Image (spheres, rainbow, N blue to C red):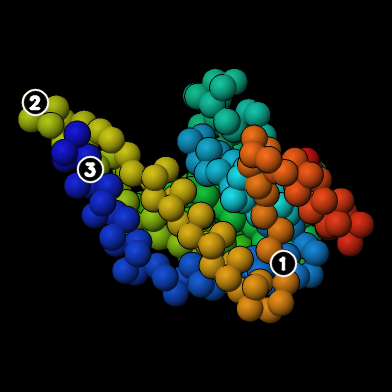
Amino acid sequence: MEAYYRAVTQVLETVQTTQQEAMEKAAAACAKAIASKRAIYLFGTGHSHMLAEEPYYRAGGLVPVIPILETGLMLHEGAVKSTKLERLTGYAAILLEQAAVGDGDVLFIISNSGINALPVEMAEEASRRGAAVIALTSLAHSRNAVSRSASGAKLYELADIVLDNGGVPGDAAVTLEGMDVPIAPTSTIAGAFILNSIVVLTCKRLLEAGIEPPVFRSANVAGGSSHNDRLIEELRQAGARLRL
């Protein structure tokens, strides 16, 4: 446990000291989208789908957040199936068309390796659609791996903004004597910290622009449900695309 604690705190320290500029840029893109009544989309496959859900419809989260959740990519219909689908060429255009990602939107693509066909093609197709593409990935892993995409590109090479989760290649960060395989990944913890930091920075920018940040309250505190209902209705009347 001590070894994992040290690994996690080291990763968070690395993120805090190296990713502030990138997080500020991501927050600026998100604030611009919200001010323009556009949406903030998040997409990830396998365990990364948890981070696509992290900021969605929760206390302290931004209202105009839409995760792109494809059940075949989310492990519960089969982990091996999810891995195979992530390497499938041509899937990205279908998902983006269904989600209606377009000009002025923001799309976070979360992939620790950033080398498989689906996240790479999501970045390529989203850019063609006019969305700002933000990659959340491990640069240490991606830079030292071979792309599996048809174009030969990697996610971080295509994104407008790159967020490095600070993890080691393969993600697992702890080794024990007597084991050849490392354990205890860090990408989920680092990714949640990065995404929620961007929420904080986005709200700060909106306030500086004189815009009320559209943030959910907990539905389990007094006044929470009425607050949330008001924000949802106001944004829908203003033309924001919400899926709640």
- Whether residue 117 appears in this view of the structure is no
- Which of discs 3 and 2 lies nearer the camera? The answer is 3
Q: Nearer the viewer, residue 127 or 100?
A: 100
Residue 171 spot, x, y in % from top left: 32, 43
Q: Is residue 165 above or below residue 116?
A: below
- Which of discs 1 and 2 lies nearer the camera? The answer is 1
- Which of discs 3 and 1 lies nearer the camera? The answer is 1
Q: Is residue 135 above or below residue 210?
A: above
Dot 3 and dot 1 residues touching (CB under 8 Å)? no
Would residue 191 appear left or right of 176 to someone viewing this image? right
Q: Nearer the viewer, residue 131 or 237?
A: 237
The residue singled out by tag 3 in the image is: 5
Residue 99 spot, x, y in % from top left: 77, 47
* Distance between the alpha carbons at the discs numbered 3 and 2: 20 Å
Q: Amino acid at mark 3?
A: Tyr
| Residue at left offset 71%, top offset 77% | 210
Q: Which mark is residue 98?
A: none
Helix, strand or loop status at disc 1: loop
For disc 3, the neighbor class at 10 Å (few under 14, some 14 to 19, many from 20) is few
Q: Is residue 60 above or below residue 74?
A: below
Q: Nearer the viewer, residue 168 or 21?
A: 21
Residue 123 spot, x, y in % from top left: 61, 58
Q: Which mark is residue 178?
A: 2
Q: Amino acid at mark 2?
A: Gly
Q: Is residue 34 above or below residue 118?
A: below
From this viewpoint, which residue is outermost toward the top?
77
From this viewpoint, which residue is outermost toward the bottom?
209
Residue 156 spot, x, y in % from top left: 48, 62
* Distance between the alpha carbons at the discs numbered 3 and 1: 37 Å
Q: Amino acid at mark 1?
A: Glu
- Whether residue 102 appears in this view of the structure is yes
Q: Quadrant of residue 236?
A: bottom right
